[in-house]
Image (cartoon, rainbow, N blue to C red):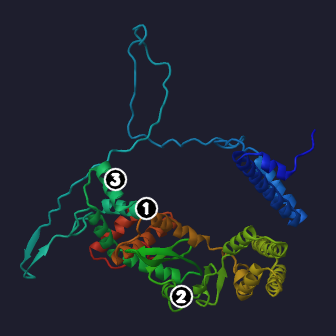
C-alpha cells in the first residue's frame, strides 16, 4: 500500500467536480460521526439502570409484532347469538318430487330449522284527529272533546318521530342534515332541518320540569362528580358543565368556567362530597372533596415521560406507592377491623404529608408537592367514606359524547339550541344510567306535559 498523498497535493491534482464530490462525501461522514457521538454521550450520561431499560425497550421495539389473533382465546367457551323465544311467522319448504330425477317423494325423514331476524320496513303513518265541540246549556259556552292519548297539540310531527330525532341528534351525534336524510330514506318522512331544530327546542321547554327534578335530586345526593369542557354558541366560546352520579346526569352550558357556575349547580347548601379534578374553580365550593387520583397519576406519568432525571424518579415511585397502598386499603376495608383500618389510614395520611413537606430539586416536584400539600385532605378522602370513588371517571364518561358531537359539528347556533342540548342530553343520559327505555319514557312524559300535566314524571322519585 502506497504512502497517502498530502492533503495540499490532492487539492492541486484534482479538478473542480472531483473536489465537490469529495466535499459532499466528507460532509455526510461528519454528520454520521456527529450523530454517533451524540448517542454515545447520551448513553454515558444515562444511569446504568435506566440505560438497561432503554436498551430493552429498543430491542423489543425491533421485534416484529405477532399477527393479531381474532376471536376469543383458546379454551374459552363459545358464544352464539341467542335464539328468539318465539317466531312471528313460520315458512315451511317441501318437495313433491326429487329435483334431480323427478321421482315422487314420501313424507320427509328430517326437518332442519333456520332462524332469521329482520326488521319491518318503516313508513309514515298519517293520523287525522277530529275533536268534536259542543254547546253546554248549563255553562253557556262551547266545550271541546279532549285530545287523543297519542296526540301532541299543535304539532304535525308525532311523538315517536320527535323522540327518534332526539336520540339521533343527542345520543348518536348526527347533524340535522343527516337526520333529515335518514328520516326520508328509511320512512319517507319529509322534514326540513329548521323544522327539526325548532321541534326539538319546543320539546326541551316542555321537558325542562324533568331536568329540574334531576338537579334537585343531585343536590341531595351523598356525593357528586363535576367536570367541564369547551363549547361554542354561534362561534363564541362557552363551557359545558356536567354534574353526575351513578344514576343521574345534569348538563348546563354557560359563558364562564368560573366557580359561580358550579355554585349555581350545587345550590346554596350541598352537604355531600364533591369529586373533581384539580381545577381551581372547585377549590372553595364545599368543605368535603375528593380529588381525582387518575388525573394525578396521569400527570405524574406525563412528567416522567417528558423529563425523567434521577431526582424525579425517586419521588415519583414514592408517591405512586402511597396512592396504591391507599387503593388497596380501600379494597380490603371489609376484611379489616375498624381499629386496624383507622391505624393504617392515619399512617397513610402521615406518609402523604411528609412527602408533600419534602425538599425537592426537580422543578416538577417543586410544583406538585405544593399541590399535594394544599389538597392532602382531599387526596385520600375516599378512605373516610365507604364506597366513595377515588376518581372522576363518571363525569369524564358522561362528557365524552359531547366531545364527539363537538368534533363533528359547530355545537349550537343559538341560546335556545344550547338550552335544548343541555335539557335533552340530561334526560337521555339519566335514562341510560338507569337502564330505562328512552323511547317509551320520553313519549309518556312529553305527551303528558303537552296536555297540561305540570308535575315531573320521569324522575319523581329520583
Q: Which of 81/364 is in front?
A: 364
Q: Which of 122/236 is in front?
A: 236
Give the Cα distance between marks 2 and 1. 29 Å
**Number of marks in the image?**
3
Earlier sequence position, callout 1 versus callout 3: 1
SS class of the residue under badge 2?
A: helix
Q: Alpha-carbon neighbours of circle 1 within 10 Å: few (<14), some, or many (≥20)?
A: many
Q: Alpha-carbon neighbours of circle 3 within 10 Å: few (<14), some, or many (≥20)?
A: some
SS class of the residue under badge 3?
A: helix
Q: Quadrant of residue 54?
A: bottom right
Look at the picture and state if 54 lies above or below 145: above
Earlier sequence position, callout 2 versus callout 3: 3
Q: Which of 422/96 is in front?
A: 422
At horizontal 14% and vertical 66% (from top left) the residue drawn is 131
* Residue 284 % position (x, y): 60, 91
Give the Cα distance between marks 1 and 3. 13 Å
The quadrant in which the N terminus is found is top right
Residue 131 in view here = yes
At horizontal 71% and vertical 81% (from top left) the residue drawn is 379
Question: Mark 2 — residue?
Answer: 259
- Callout 2–callout 1 Cβ contact below 8 Å: no
Q: Is 30 positioned to the left or the right of 461 in the image?
A: right
Question: Mark 1 — residue?
Answer: 173
Give the Cα distance between marks 2 and 3. 41 Å
Q: Which mark is residue 182?
A: 3
Amino acid at each position: 500500500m502506497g504512502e497517502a498523498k498530502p492533503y495540499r497535493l490532492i487539492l492541486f491534482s484534482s479538478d473542480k467536480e472531483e473536489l465537490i464530490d469529495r466535499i459532499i462525501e466528507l460532509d455526510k461522514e461528519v454528520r454520521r460521526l456527529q450523530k454517533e457521538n451524540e448517542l454515545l454521550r447520551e448513553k454515558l450520561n444515562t444511569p446504568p439502570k435506566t440505560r438497561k431499560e432503554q436498551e430493552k425497550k429498543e430491542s423489543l421495539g425491533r421485534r416484529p409484532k405477532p399477527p393479531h389473533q381474532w376471536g376469543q382465546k383458546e379454551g374459552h367457551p363459545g358464544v352464539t347469538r341467542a335464539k328468539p323465544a318465539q317466531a312471528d311467522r313460520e315458512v315451511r319448504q317441501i318437495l313433491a318430487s326429487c329435483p334431480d330425477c323427478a321421482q315422487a317423494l314420501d313424507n320427509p325423514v328430517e326437518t332442519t330449522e333456520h332462524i332469521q331476524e329482520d326488521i319491518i320496513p318503516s313508513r309514515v303513518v298519517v293520523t287525522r284527529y277530529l275533536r268534536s265541540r259542543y254547546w253546554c246549556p248549563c255553562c253557556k259556552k262551547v266545550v271541546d272533546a279532549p285530545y287523543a292519548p297519542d296526540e301532541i297539540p299543535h304539532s304535525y310531527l308525532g311523538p315517536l318521530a320527535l323522540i327518534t330525532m332526539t336520540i339521533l341528534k343527542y345520543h348518536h351525534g348526527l347533524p340535522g342534515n343527516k337526520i333529515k336524510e335518514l328520516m326520508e330514506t328509511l320512512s319517507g318522512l319529509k322534514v326540513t332541518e329548521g323544522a327539526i331544530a325548532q321541534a326539538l327546542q319546543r320539546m326541551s321547554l316542555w321537558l325542562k320540569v324533568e331536568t329540574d327534578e334531576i338537579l334537585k335530586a343531585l343536590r341531595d345526593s351523598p356525593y357528586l362528580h363535576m367536570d367541564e369542557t369547551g363549547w361554542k354558541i354561534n362561534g363564541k366560546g362557552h363551557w359545558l358543565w356536567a354534574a353526575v352520579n351513578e344514576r343521574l346526569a345534569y348538563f348546563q352550558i354557560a359563558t364562564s368556567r368560573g366557580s359561580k357556575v358550579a355554585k349555581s349547580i350545587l345550590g346554596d347548601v350541598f352537604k355531600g362530597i364533591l369529586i373533581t379534578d384539580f381545577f381551581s374553580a372547585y377549590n372553595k365550593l364545599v368543605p368535603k372533596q375528593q380529588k381525582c387520583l387518575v388525573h394525578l397519576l396521569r400527570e405524574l406519568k406525563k412528567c416522567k415521560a417528558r423529563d425523567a432525571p434521577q431526582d424525579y424518579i425517586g419521588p415519583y415511585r414514592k408517591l405512586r406507592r402511597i396512592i396504591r397502598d391507599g387503593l388497596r386499603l380501600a379494597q380490603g376495608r371489609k376484611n379489616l377491623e375498624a381499629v386496624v383500618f383507622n391505624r393504617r389510614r392515619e399512617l397513610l395520611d402521615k406518609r402523604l404529608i411528609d412527602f408533600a413537606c419534602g425538599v425537592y430539586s426537580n422543578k416538577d416536584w417543586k410544583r406538585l408537592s405544593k399541590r399535594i400539600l394544599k389538597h392532602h385532605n382531599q387526596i385520600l378522602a375516599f378512605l373516610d367514606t365507604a364506597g366513595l370513588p377515588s376518581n372522576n371517571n363518571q363525569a369524564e364518561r358522561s362528557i365524552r359524547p359531547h366531545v364527539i358531537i363537538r368534533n363533528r359539528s359547530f355545537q349550537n347556533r343559538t341560546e335556545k339550541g344550547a338550552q335544548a342540548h343541555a335539557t335533552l342530553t340530561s334526560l337521555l343520559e339519566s335514562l341510560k344510567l338507569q337502564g330505562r327505555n328512552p323511547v317509551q319514557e320520553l313519549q309518556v312524559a312529553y305527551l303528558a306535559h303537552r296536555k297540561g300535566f305540570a308535575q315531573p314524571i320521569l324522575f319523581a322519585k329520583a
